[in-house]
Image (spheres, rainbow, N blue to C red):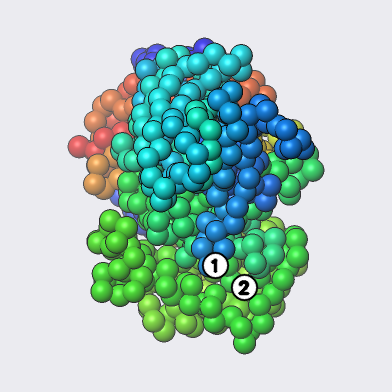
Amino acid sequence: MKRIHKTVTVVVLLTGFFAFGQQKLEVDIANTITKIQPTMFGVFFEDINFAADGGLYAEMIKNRSFEFEAPLMGWIQPNSDKHSLNNESGIADIIKYGGTVTNHNFCRVTVKNDKGYVLINEGFRGMGIKKEAHYNLFLEAKKLQGNISKITIQFIDKAGNVLGETSIIPTSSDWKNYSAELIATKTEAKAQLKVTFQGAGQLDLDMISLFPQDTWKGRKKGLRKDLVQLLYDLKPGFLRFPGGCIVEGRTLAKRYQWKKTVGPIEEREILVNRWNTEFAHKLTPDYFQSFGLGFFEYFQLSEDLGATPLPILSCGIACQFNTGELVSLENLDPYVQDALDLIEFANGAVTTPWGKIRNDMGHPAPFNLKFIGVGNEQWGPQYIERYKVFSKAIKDKYPNITIVSGSGPFPEGDYFDYGMKELKKLNAEIIDEHYYKNPKWFRDNATRYDNYDRKGPKIFAGEYAAQSVAIASPDNKNNWDCAVSEAAFITGLERNAEVVHLTSYAPLMAHEEGWQWTPDMIWFNNLESYGTANYYVQKLFSNNKGTDLISITKEGKPLVGQENLYASAVKDIIKKEVILKLVNTSADIQNIEVSLKGEKLMSKGIAQVLTSEKLADENSFEFPQKISPIESEINLKKEKASTSLAPYSLTVLKFKMK
Ligand code: AHR
């Protein structure tokens, strides 16, 4: 696959062009309308589309501890026949530990002869290995009868060619941890791991794990570097986690429980991923949550990204699109306690029970948690009743924590109207709204927040993405039509920064072969990743969020789509910059002249233009930066700049204050 990095820097002097037919815009730099919240542009993370296991969490072995519902799923035994007592070389049996252990199973390997009994792990749609890269292999083993004298571990390709090899000599008749290093001799996107046993006898195995050494920040058993880098480059203001519907579970028993995701990874009980068989169009029966990327790793990632953590917890209602199971109000305590304990885990002194666990995991300093979300897409009186209980308990104990509540799955209609009305009555601090709509909806709704009550709850545009076909259709595309329409809409979010305090595109990531839901902001396979056009829209806004909202108008009115033109403006009082975002959603060039009043500015600024010839254009593994910003210079004469906005484009203009 060819990767093209666009490094072209086109220097165009735009001032003075197209004097005829210019639209005259005015920017008032001196008057701050409102402060832009540092959380204005953030990231929504959910383990959907292999985003955690098989994605961001760099573990390469699928079903490392034999805990899937089919405990040998992901493991192939090429020279063994489970249905024959005379199977040639050996067999793998799954044995239960018994008792209260959370890692329930291990694998007992019986090797009958020296014909080389083999187990192969297929990885997450294969394993991506890179020539000369180093990989750490870990396993737990216990020798039983006979003498299995050596375990050979190899990367192999489809044809069985060996692409790297190491070995482990099992020595102990007690459980013992072993590790080894593998070096790949070739780059291969669909390698597998072949484990060959020499000698005859029995051996117990568990937690067979493989990670690249080159992870984000070089952390052992850490996160995939290229994917974190894409997040880091967004400079996100917050990191929402763990979702999404995954918070709720299809049933209450299968909800996301953060306490089960901290402490030693081998003790984190795995859970079926709720997206596993949710969509008939994309069944993913091998999708489970190992929780190797659990709540500690989440807080640590937030810290790395400089993003405020924003955890969302179950409020005692399972997904209402599935079972909608409810915990009765009398039995809600453990759920509320989970929220209180999470705050302690994040912020508590190391002498508190949960603060101690954070400390034991290597982070004595608090994670500075400021927000907590109660429920995801819940609706109806059942939600409001439960929200009240959470809200009281959290505020009683932690008055400085801001609570995020939800308005349900849709941005209008009965559920939405009811939720908003009730939450307003309760003086909810921040309400989460979700919109998965067509591109036109986004263009038409740039004024959505213009009339929201400035004194009412603040808004978290917590999940949104333009859907090119229909909500969650497998045919949806991350095309330029969707991205430029989102850009138009985002100018409306920014213009209303007094009300809108947080925003995030959703979902965040998808594996090329392991996805269930599209569109998604970042796509990856086992070796590569790229940001979509939507990613670059997010990046342009987030990297240029500024500190203060200022006005940009035409004939005294904000630009909300008149003649297909949308605009918002901010200044950054720390960097001493004025930043304009202009979106042209027409098929024609639009010529503009901007007068910037209220500050003296340097005579040269920067223009960043994101556009593409066709609305159907997309980025891809082959052309990952087909749609990405191109930077040029722009001149300013007497505080006036003239430019022509390309058809279907987002333009960011940046000027330095003197
Ligand atoms: O982003 C995908 C899903 O869409 C989320 O899990 C859910 O909250 C919404 O319905």
Q: Which residue is mark 1?
A: 99
Please determine whether, in this image, residue 85 is positioned above or below residue 403: above
Label 2 neighbourhood size at 10 Å, few (<14), some (14-19), many (20+)? many
Left or right side of 52 for 585: right
In this rendering, is residue 336 above or below 492?
below
Q: Is mark 2 within 8 Å of ligand 1?
A: no
The residue lying toward the viewer, choosing from 245 and 44, is 245
x, y percent for residue 180: 36, 32
Identify the residue shown where x is 31% and y is 28%.
Answer: 605
Please say if the residues under marks 2 and 1 sit with CB atoms less than 8 Å apart: no
Which quadrant, please, contains the N terminus?
top right
Q: Is residue 395 visible?
A: yes
Q: Quadrant of residue 636?
A: top left
Residue matched to label 2: 316
Residues 537 and 26: in front is 537
Label located before the other in sequence (2 or 1): 1
> In the rendered structure, which amino acid carries the disc numbered 1?
Gly
Q: Which mark is residue 412?
A: none
Query: Where residue 19 appears, x then y in whole percent?
Result: 47, 21
Residue 73 coordinates in the image, percent (x, y): 65, 41
Label 1 crowd bin: few (<14), some (14–19), many (20+), radius 10 Å: few
The residue lying at 57 percent from left, 76 percent from top is: 387
Q: Going 57% across and 40% down the picture, which residue do you hit?
A: 109
Q: Is residue 25 left or right of residue 72?
A: left
Q: Label 2 to label 1, Cα distance in Å?
A: 28 Å
Q: Is residue 547 left or right of residue 265?
A: left
Whether label 1 lies within 8 Å of ligand 1 gets the answer: no
Foreground residue, 657 or 71?
71
